[in-house]
Image: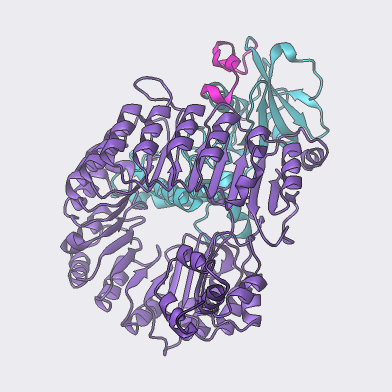
């Protein structure tokens, strides 16, 4: 029984934003369930095939903001065929039909068409925010319709999408009356940009806080843009063809000096190192710096710049910074929370002295007390280093280590890295995401199962010896939601041991493992609430046919996920849903 | 396998491709497919094709296509005194001089020709882009790198003995490379001219010499 009128309860619920909390509230009682669902504005759907749009709309009629994720994570690394699925169109159609007052749409790894964008732009008069991450299937024509028709558009954020750039005039399509933009990110567009249209748009957008341009925006245009947007907080720089002449450089520096609110800097693809120095005037204000595309800036330039960035909380960088550079980061960036170090040199032949090693990682762990998220690509690692890191940084939430060579052991002892990763999971009690690499036996999974109590996402590649490894994880990690495994010797025994475990997980991915078609079929029979998808190699049709007959045939790629709406109808020929 | 034909005239223009241990380039596919222009439908598979062009396992190391492409594009644009170089830690001063070369390279891009490669005793097969090579020697060298210099957990213990396999094309080698042609027959690699081979090969298999019966799989 409620002691307050529904409106009051609803008002109280307004203060509860987190999806998890709201989901919990809705389980308290029927009355709370109803109040919660009718007042819910924001919904997050981690797997677009777990539910369908009709049921979503039925449950949450007041929906304003929808986040959808499509393809599994390994699609980022080309392990999922492009035609696999994740189409947003049916969602937009359903939302439009039900006249949902959609204001915000955030999509990740989904297929978006120009038709979808056109429909979106015409169907939701209050639409304010479109964020597309790692999506594909559309062109700048689709962007043009969004620009032209969404009269209240505030945010257009395109991150790392595959967009067919027709080099049209999509920027021109923003009406002159459009002045509400707060965020515009088109850094992933490959074609030319209408600079005049861009400048006019920025000039008439006084609330613009985030601007990320693409490679086609040269230095002098950037200078003009910054001059008419000194209020910018977040800037993505394009490219510079050559080193700037003295005058252009001074003008740029002057414009940058005026941007006193600037806190986040990114881009810098194809940039002459000197251009980074133009940002010296404001670098002590920066909290976020992404130089991971700036392959042309040498380590020493990076180091000189970062020396002044004392307030950095987030740093994405290339390994050209070297261990020495990371030591500078460790002594300078005491506020650092998130670090990502990407490989800069993809050619193995050179014995690259300047790349990062375990030394840099240890230095960071020792120097940055607030560090909680790390993604680190390197060529070598040791157990001793990982044990030290674990001792220095027990607060890791995300720990992703990628040793470039599969199965590489500790380079000083030639042993596996089981003990190192074991130390990490034992010390970091709040660890939610882990990626392991290097030479690993079943033992590391024993440790993970034993200690990683909060672990929600685990990525495994080229690791383990027997089914026991996978079983340790499935049995031990109670909070596991996403498990993705490739090239590891786990098979049917592990897959089938505890079918009910998959009720508690969002999804499981296994590729190039030991599971067979027979095992997958058995799983599908025992778990009708799962979609068990087999993704076949599609170059040899005869291989595919053989797969269908022989249950002992190993499955190349398996993707399973819980769903309340059964097998999807839009799977392409290369996908078999058992 | 003693007479190995190698085509002399064809140009292998994919810089850095001949070295099989390249890191992943999501965008590295650009080297093979020149994705500097706006993407076409075919380009959306660029990442996979690049991995394959480099003779790598697909999707390793785990980097987004977008990111790999950016590195490769920049690698191409940075010259050294020797001409195009894969080392991207260089001065941009001579960058202009390289633009022309970049364009030339674009003209030679071939679309990848992907075939599966398996080896007796190896659990995990690989895929390879035959257009990345201009001769049997180049192919053999890459296969050697892929299968005989791979850490043990990907192969059976027998493969640790690399002595007999150091020269795949050598008559004395313990292993031989065979291919399945359009008709489904298994043939010895190296008997026909390289370009003719490209025209009929469907998949490759590295067999132990003693197991060779001349028959198919």
Residue plotted at (45% across, 65% down): A21
Q: Nearer the viewer, residue A462 or B8?
A: A462
Instruction: Kindly indicate the quadrant of the structure image that contains residue A511.
Output: top right
Q: Is residue B154 magenta?
A: yes
Residue A169 appears in the figure: no
Q: Is residue B46 magenta?
A: no
Q: Colour of chain B?
A: cyan
Q: Is residue A217 above or below residue A329?
A: below
Residue plotted at (53% across, 84% down): A149
Question: Looking at the picture, how far across and down is residue B41, in whole percent?
Answer: 63, 59
Question: Looking at the picture, how far across and down is residue A58, in whole percent?
Answer: 64, 76
Q: Is residue A406 above or below residue A293?
A: above
Residue A188 appears in the figure: yes
Q: Locate the N terminus of chain B and report the quarter of the image it occupies.
A: top right
Question: Looking at the picture, how far across and down is residue B84, in whole percent?
Answer: 40, 41
Q: Which residues are magenta?
A: B151-171
Residue plotted at (64% across, 40% down): A498
Q: Nearer the viewer, residue A182 or A301?
A: A182
Question: Looking at the picture, how far across and down is residue A404, in whole percent?
Answer: 44, 35
Instruction: Kindly indicate the quadrant of the structure image that contains residue A417.
Output: top left
Q: Colour of chain A?
A: purple
């Amino acid at each position: 029984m409620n002691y307050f009128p529904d409106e009051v309860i609803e008002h109280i619920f307004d203060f509860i934003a987190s999806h998890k909390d709201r989901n919990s509230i809705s389980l308290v009682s029927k009355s709370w369930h109803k109040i919660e669902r009718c007042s819910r504005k924001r919904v997050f759907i981690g797997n677009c095939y777990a539910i369908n749009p009709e049921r979503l709309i039925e449950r949450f009629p007041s929906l304003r903001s929808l986040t959808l994720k499509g393809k599994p994570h390994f699609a980022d690394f080309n392990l999922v065929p492009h035609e696999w699925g994740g189409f947003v169109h049916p969602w937009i159609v359903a939302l439009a039909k039900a006249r949902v007052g959609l204001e915000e749409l955030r999509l990740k790894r989904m297929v978006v068409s120009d038709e979808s964008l056109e429909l979106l732009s015409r169907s939701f008069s209050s639409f304010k925010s479109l964020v597309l991450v790692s999506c594909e299937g559309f062109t700048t024509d689709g962007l043009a319709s969004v620009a032209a028709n969404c009269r209240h558009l505030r945010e257009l954020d395109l991150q790392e999408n595959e967009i067919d750039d027709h080099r049209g005039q999509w920027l021109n399509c923003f009406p002159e009356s459009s002045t509400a933009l707060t965020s515009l990110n088109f850094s992933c567009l490959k074609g030319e940009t209408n600079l005049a249209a861009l400048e006019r748009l920025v000039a008439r957008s006084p609330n613009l806080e985030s601007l990320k341009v693409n490679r086609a925006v040269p230095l002098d245009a950037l200078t003009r843009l910054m001059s008419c947007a000194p209020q910018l907080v977040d800037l993505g720089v394009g490219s510079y063809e050559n080193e700037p002449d003295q005058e252009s450089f001074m003008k740029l520096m002057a414009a940058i000096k005026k941007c006193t609110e600037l806190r986040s800097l990114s881009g810098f693809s194809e940039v002459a190192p000197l251009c980074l120095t133009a940002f010296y005037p404001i670098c002590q204000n920066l909290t976020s710096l992404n130089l991971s595309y700036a392959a042309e800036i040498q380590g020493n330039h990076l180091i000189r710049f970062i020396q002044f960035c004392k307030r950095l909380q987030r740093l994405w960088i290339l390994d050209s910074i070297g261990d020495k550079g990371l030591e500078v980061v460790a002594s300078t960036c005491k506020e650092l929370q998130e670090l990502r170090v990407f490989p800069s040199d993809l050619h193995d032949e050179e014995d690259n002295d300047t790349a990062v090693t375990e030394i840099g990682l240890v230095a960071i762990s020792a120097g940055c007390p607030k560090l909680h998220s790390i993604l680190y690509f390197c060529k070598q690692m040791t157990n001793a280093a990982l044990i030290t890191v674990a001792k220095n940084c027990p607060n890791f939430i995300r720990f992703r280590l990628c040793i470039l060579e599969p199965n590489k052991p500790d380079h000083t002892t030639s042993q596996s890295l089981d003990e190192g990763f074991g130390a990490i999971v034992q010390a970091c009690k709040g660890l939610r995401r882990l990626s392991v690499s290097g030479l690993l036996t079943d033992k590391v999974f024993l440790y993970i199962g034993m200690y990683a109590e909060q672990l929600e996402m685990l990525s495994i590649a080229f690791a383990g010896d027997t089914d026991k490894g996978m079983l340790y994880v499935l049995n031990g990690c109670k909070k596991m939601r996403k498990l993705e495994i490739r090239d590891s010797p786990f098979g049917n025994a592990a897959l089938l041991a505890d079918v009910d475990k998959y009720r508690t997980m969002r999804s499981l991915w296994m590729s190039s493992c030991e599971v067979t078609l027979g095992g997958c079929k058995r799983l599908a029979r025992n778990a009708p609430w799962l979609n068990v998808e087999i993704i076949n190699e599609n170059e040899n049709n005869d291989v595919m046919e053989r797969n269908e007959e022989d249950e002992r045939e190993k499955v190349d790629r398996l993707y399973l996920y819980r769903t309340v709406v059964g097998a999807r109808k839009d799977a392409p020929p290369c996908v078999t849903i058992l | 396998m003693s007479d190995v034909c190698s085509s002399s005239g064809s140009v292998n223009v994919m810089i850095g491709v001949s070295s099989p241990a390249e890191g992943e380039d999501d965008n590295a596919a650009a080297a093979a497919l020149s994705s500097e222009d706006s993407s076409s439908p075919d380009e959306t598979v660029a990442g996979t094709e690049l991995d394959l062009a480099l003779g790598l396992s697909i999707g390793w190391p785990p980097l987004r296509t977008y990111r790999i492409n950016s590195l490769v594009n920049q690698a191409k644009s940075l010259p050294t005194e020797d001409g195009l170089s894969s080392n991207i830690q260089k001065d941009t001063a001579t960058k202009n001089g390289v633009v022309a070369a970049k364009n030339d390279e674009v003209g030679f891009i071939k679309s990848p020709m992907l075939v599966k490669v398996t080896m007796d005793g190896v659990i995990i097969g690989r895929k390879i882009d035959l257009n990345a090579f201009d001769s049997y020697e180049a192919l053999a060298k890459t296969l050697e790198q892929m299968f005989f210099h791979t850490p043990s957990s990907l192969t059976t213990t027998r493969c640790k003995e690399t002595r007999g396999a150091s020269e795949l094309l050598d008559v004395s080698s313990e292993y031989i490379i065979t291919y399945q042609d359009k008709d489904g027959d298994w043939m010895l690699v190296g008997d026909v001219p390289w370009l003719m081979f490209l025209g009929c090969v469907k998949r490759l298999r590295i067999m132990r010499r003693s197991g060779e019966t001349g028959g198919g799989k």
